[in-house]
């Protein structure tokens, strides 16, 4: 489930740079409040350099926080980051662990990654 604020932030982020900036600020607040969905999306923004300077290490921290809170898409993304060494040291064993946790949590993309390994 997504909070109304997060739904609105995602909706706004599809419109304009000003709206994306607003969404970014909302994600930051929600991240500090412990919302793993916001931490994950904020991490993706830093990973991709969208409206913020690309920072793989900070993206890793945010996505790791969301993954540890049990959010399957973040667990899958953390697996990818370990797999590729983006923001952290490459570690195929940890990648496999996080892909597996995400797949068991219902993340289909993680299941597909595992099927192709």
Image (cartoon, rainbow, N blue to C red):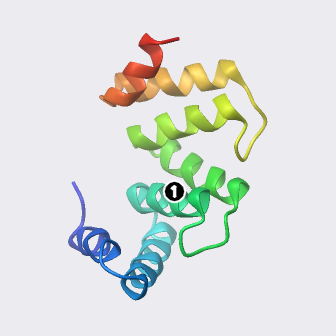
Q: Residue at x 46, y 46 (%)?
A: 69
Q: Is residue 70 visible?
A: no
**Residue sitting nearer the eye, 47 or 43:** 47
Q: How many marks?
A: 1
Residue 93, by quadrant, is top right
Task: Examine the rendered structure and indicate whether residue 98 appears above or below residue 30.
Answer: above
Q: Residue at x 55, y 50 (%)?
A: 63
Give the SS element for disc 1. helix
Q: On the rendered structure, is 39 left or right of 104?
A: right
Quarter of the N terminus within the rendering: bottom left
Q: Position of residue 101 (x, y in %)?
A: 45, 25
Q: Residue at x 75, y 42 (%)?
A: 88
Residue furthest to the front in view is 16
Q: Position of residue 14 (x, y in %)?
A: 31, 71
**Residue sitting nearer the eye, 18 or 34:** 18
Q: On the rendered structure, is 30 left or right of 65?
A: left
Sort mark 1 into few (<14), some (14-19) or many (20+) by Cα contacts within 10 Å.
many
Q: Residue at x 60, y 74 (%)?
A: 52
Residue 10, by quadrant, is bottom left
Q: On the rendered structure, is 2 left or right of 37?
A: left
Check disc 1 and report the residue beneath it. 44
Task: Examine the rendered structure and indicate whether residue 11 appears above or below residue 86.
Answer: below
Q: Is residue 18 visible?
A: yes
Residue furthest to the right in view is 89
Task: Examine the rendered structure and indicate whether residue 90 appears above or below residue 12.
Answer: above
Q: Position of residue 82 (x, y in %)?
A: 66, 33
């Amino acid at each position: 489930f997504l909070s109304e604020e997060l739904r609105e932030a995602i909706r706004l982020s599809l419109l304009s740079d000003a709206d994306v900036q607003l969404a970014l600020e909302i994600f930051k607040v929600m991240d500090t409040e412990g919302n793993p969905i916001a931490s994950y999306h904020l991490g993706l923004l830093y990973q991709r350099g969208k409206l913020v300077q690309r920072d793989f290490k900070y993206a890793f921290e945010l996505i790791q926080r969301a993954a540890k809170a049990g959010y399957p898409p973040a667990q899958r993304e953390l697996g990818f980051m370990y797999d590729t060494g983006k923001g952290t040291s490459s570690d195929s064993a940890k990648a496999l662990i996080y892909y597996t946790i995400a797949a068991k949590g219902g993340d289909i993309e993680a299941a597909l990654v595992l099927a192709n390994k």
